[in-house]
Image (cartoon, helix red, strand yellow):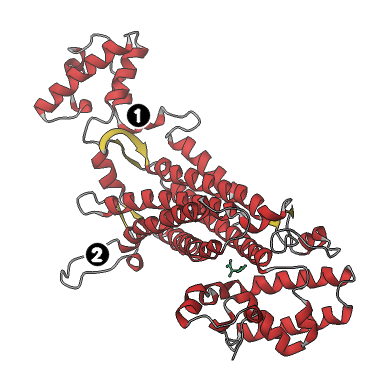
Amino acid sequence: NKAQAWSARFSEPVSDLVKRYTASVDFDKRLAAFDIQGSLAHADMLAAAGVISAEDNTAIEQGMARILEEIDAGRFEWSLDLEDVHLNIEKRLVELIGDAGKRLHTGRSRNDQVATDIRLWLRAEIDQSSGLLHQLRRRLAQLALEHADTIMPGFTHLQVAQPVTFGHHLLAYAEMFGRDAERLADCRKRVNRLPLGAAALAGTSYPIDRERVARTLGFDGVCRNSLDAVSDRDFAIEFCAAAALIMVHVSRLSEELVLWMSPRVGFIDLADRFCTGSSIMPQKKNPDVPELARGKTGRVNGHLVALLTLMKGQPLAYNKDNQEDKEGLFDAADTIRDTLTIFADMVGGIRVHPDAMRAAALQGFATATDLADYLVKKGVPFRDAHETVARAVRACEEQSCDLADLSLEALQAFHASIQQDVFQVLTLEGSVAGRRHIGGTAPDRVRLEAERVLDDTASF
Ligand code: ARG
């Protein structure tokens, strides 16, 4: 007996399955506060334009305040028969205030209404996740500052390559998350445009003032074409792309945390609250949180592909396909929000084992490149230096020792220009300290860069 808002046109009701299939209220009710915010701005503009009376506008404000209370208190009765968040709220408004409530939808359609709701909601999500990205960057920079001098092996192909500082390694992630925040800020510019006024697709003949509504709602401007305004979800796709990259970066960090925490590596420990035990093996402490984050990357990547696919074949203007934009978008936003919150906390609680890092850096001839560079500085062409050092490494391998363990005489047998000062570059400390240019791994440079990130994120 709860007839649909459009049912006068139809001769039979939809089946229960079709009702459930087409309804979105179960998931779009989370847009309720934004739906009300948009309605209030619309009603205020209608009143200012003389389309509805000031009394009607006041009644709408009062009714909506009451509805918001009911929703917040969990007392609002959501009905599947009323299809979506928009019709549920409108129906309740009419129950509460009568004809004034019936006038709210003047010059508006659910098509421009829902596009407005999503944009308002997404803008808030972007602001929150940007803040979280900067908090995570701060934690990384704080740990980097503590470990500006801690030496670890840097890897290529997962083989020991050259020594780096742990602080430098952490700041690589601060850079990635910094670009992610820039991407969100860029996406926000295109999210923050007002679709209202487009109505169903063609605009409306009422004397509406879209700029006024945009100002009320804090939008930077209005969508300039009504057909585009109600139909495109490219802004949501952009957000999912940015979210997917955030998760890809989280996933790379997770992979390293898992590796570093493996007893075979032993570079770090995660605080117990981010690990779980095994139901069968009593000795286990597993890095579940980073593993799960690595896994959740898959679902966010999936939401991006789903949204791209949702959009690709749609003719102008609005099609019901677009109702499918929400669940994936919501989940992408929820996933990055929770993940970034947890990671900021987890990075702050990392316990570092500098001795294990140092021992690993001493294996695998990490300073071989430094020896070659040393020879070059003595006038040896780089290709010859490379070959000389390769021979020295082979000799060390046969004797199971490090380059720095060879005596000066033994080194001079490889090249006569080698002097006592060679031992300054053959040490791990000498190797990293030499790389003091912008972007380099030297402890002094790492301290500067960490301070820069801390300044950059000071307000978060
Ligand atoms: N629930 C719909 C959505 O999410 C609202 C717009 C419905 N418009 C329509 N013409 N059926 O897209």
- Residue 392: x percent and y percent? 18, 19
Answer with the quadrant where ligand 1 appears in the image: bottom right
- Residue 241: x percent and y percent? 50, 50
Task: Tell me where residue 104 sits by quadrant.
Answer: bottom right
Is 51 rendered above or below residue 74?
Answer: above
Q: Secondary structure at mark 2?
A: loop
* Amino acid, disc 1: Ser
Count residues near mark 1 (Cα–Cα under 10 Å), then give few for <14, some for 14-19, many for 20+.
Answer: many
* Amino acid, disc 2: Lys
Q: Residue at x 29, y 61 (%)?
A: 287
- The residue labelled by disc 2 is 285
Q: Secondary structure at mark 1?
A: helix
Residues under numbered marks 1 and 2 in contact, where contact means CB atoms less than 8 Å apart: no
Is 28 rendered above or below residue 70?
Answer: above
Q: Is mark 1 within 8 Å of ligand 1?
A: no
Identify the mark nearer the N-term, 1 or 2: 2
- The residue labelled by disc 1 is 431
